[in-house]
Each structure stands twice: as C-alpha cells, then as structure tokens.
Image (tube, rainbow, N blue to C red):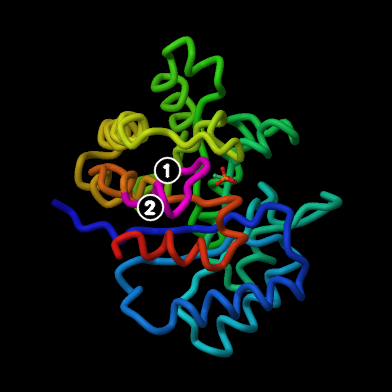
Amino acid sequence: MTERLPLMAGNWKMNLDHLEAIQHTQKLAFSLADKDYEAVEVAVLVPFTDLRSVQTLVDGDKLKLKYGSQDISQHDGGAYTGEVSGPMLAKLKVAYAAIGHSERRQYHGENEEIVNAKVKAAYRNGITPILCIGEPLEIRKAGTHVAYTLAQLDGALDGVPASDAESIVVAYEPVWAIGTGEVATPEDAQEVCGAIRGRLAELYGAELAGKVRVLYGGSVKSSSAAGLMAKPDVDGALIGGASLDADEFVKIVRYRE
Ligand code: PEP
C-alpha cells in the first residue's frame, strides 16, 4: 500500500490581517517545533494580504510550515481587476492554492469550467491545487452525494494530464458540514473519499490514485480528527474555524497523540 503523508491544512478564510497573521504563524511554529510533527505535513491557506508576512516568517526561520492561497486567478495576467495570478503567487513561493471552495462556488459563481481553468492555472505555475468538492444538504438528503461529488471531480480534472494530477490534493467538503459544527461521521467521510480515490483510479490508474491525498473538511475539531483519520481513504483535513485557534489547530495536527 502506498504511504501517503497526512496533510492538515488550515483555511483561515477572510480572517487575520497581516499583523495578526504574524502572531498566529509564530504561535503555530513555536508549538509545532518541538516534536516529530514531520509525520504530518502542515499548511496554512491565508488571505492574499497575509502571504508576504507568512512567507517572511517561514523562509526566515526555516519553519516546516507550508503556506498557500485560498484562490487563484484562471488568468496569468492582464485586465482582470481584483484578481491575483499564478505567477504572482509563485513569486511568493506558495505551495498550495485552494480551488473551488464551496464559498467561492456559492458567493462568486464559480462553476466547473472556472474551477477547471483554475486547476490548470495552478499547475501552469508550479502550485499544487487543493481541489474542494462536496455536496449541499439537499443532494445529501436525496442520496445522490457520491455521484454529485464525482461529477465535480470529473469537471475539475477535465484535460488535466496524469503528470499533473498525480500531485493534486482533493478535499471532500460536504457543504452542510462547513462552518455548521456538524462534522460528517468517519463512515460518511470514508464513503465519499473512497469513491474519489476510485474515480481517480478510473481516470488515471490505481497507482496514481494511491498517491493522491484525499482530505476531509467540514467542522473538524481535535475531538473528531482521530476518528476521521482512522479511515483508510482520509489522508488529512481541511480545517476552517478551528484553524484560527492555534492551540486547537495544533491538537488536530497531533491527532495521533
Ligand atoms: C473550510 O472552510 O474549508 C472548512 C472546512 O471550514 P470549517 O472547518 O469551519 O467547517
């Protein structure tokens, strides 16, 4: 079986200005520095305005903390007011870009075509996408959540070659669980994360699918992390609200303890 390095990624959403980001990142770095947290990769997805602050800290102190953005433009430059491009992010050495978060889909009209273009823009610029997919409540109630989520996966990966897809991170984030306090059960998370890996195997072969990290996201807390991580196809978590509390986030990172 392929060993996949667990990834715990904190999504700060639209919180923490660049000064607060410095404080928060220093606290995280201090708390994570002592023990063997190499067993888990840790990343923070920060507002664009925080990237430079976080980069300076991470580069300067050689912290083993990765950082990324919460979005990326599908375009590499030009007359796209308000957008932030892949080359700009690459220059700040971001490792990851969240793409297709449900809040982007809901409030900014991001459809499969846009998500697909953003995935390609990330790869074009050497940035690893954290592709967010997952069903809203009415789809879950109708029992069609697996098909719905796999259709989002298909759309996002349309035309993406295996040489790129092998590094993708897929985050299964049921919309009804995001920011609601209602975490999916480990069994529910496994059902869809397993199906995502199965579809990746159909699209790209079992070997590639075995390498891809599939995360669960939606109201993860330190009390739920270990149960979710015990499932074979859950390789980490995307953590929103709880990532703003450094102590709680560190407890999630150390879910094994
Ligand atoms: C998220 O923003 O991706 C998320 C999972 O949020 P929360 O953990 O707050 O539900």
User: Which residue occupies the foreground of this view, 45 or 197?
Assistant: 45
Ligand 1 is found in the corner quadrant, namely top right
Which corner quadrant holds the C terminus? bottom left
Residue 203 shown left or right of residue 151 in the figure = left
Amino acid beneath label 1: Tyr
Q: Position of residue 87 (x, y in %)?
A: 65, 64
Q: Is residue 83 magenta?
A: no
| Vertical arrangement, residue 195 with respect to residue 69, above or below | above
Q: Which residue is mark 1?
A: 216
Pinpoint residue 76: horizontal percent, then vertical percent: 69, 56
Q: Quadrant of residue 3?
A: bottom left
Residue 146 lies in quadrant: top left
> Relative to residue 28, is residue 215 drawn left or right?
left
Look at the numbered discs 2 and 1 and tell me whether their residues touch, using CB distance below 8 Å: yes
The residue lying at 44 percent from left, 30 percent from top is 154
| Sequence order check, earlier mark of 2 and 1 | 1
Residue 3's place in the image compared with 42, above or below, is above
Whether residue 203 is visible, yes or no, is no
At 43% from the left edge and 44% from the top edge, which residue is drawn? 170
92 sits left or right of 184 in the view: right
Residue 181 location (% of width, % of height): 55, 38
Q: What's the amino acid at mark 2?
A: Gly
> 158 or 213, which lies in front?
213
Question: Whole-Å distance between the Cαs marked 2 and 1?
Answer: 6 Å
Local crowd size for mark 2, using a 10 Å CA cut-off: few (<14), some (14–19), many (≥20): many
Q: Residue at left 76%, top 72%?
A: 18
Q: Which residue is mark 2?
A: 236
Which disc number belongs to residue 206? none
Magenta segment, which residues? 217-226
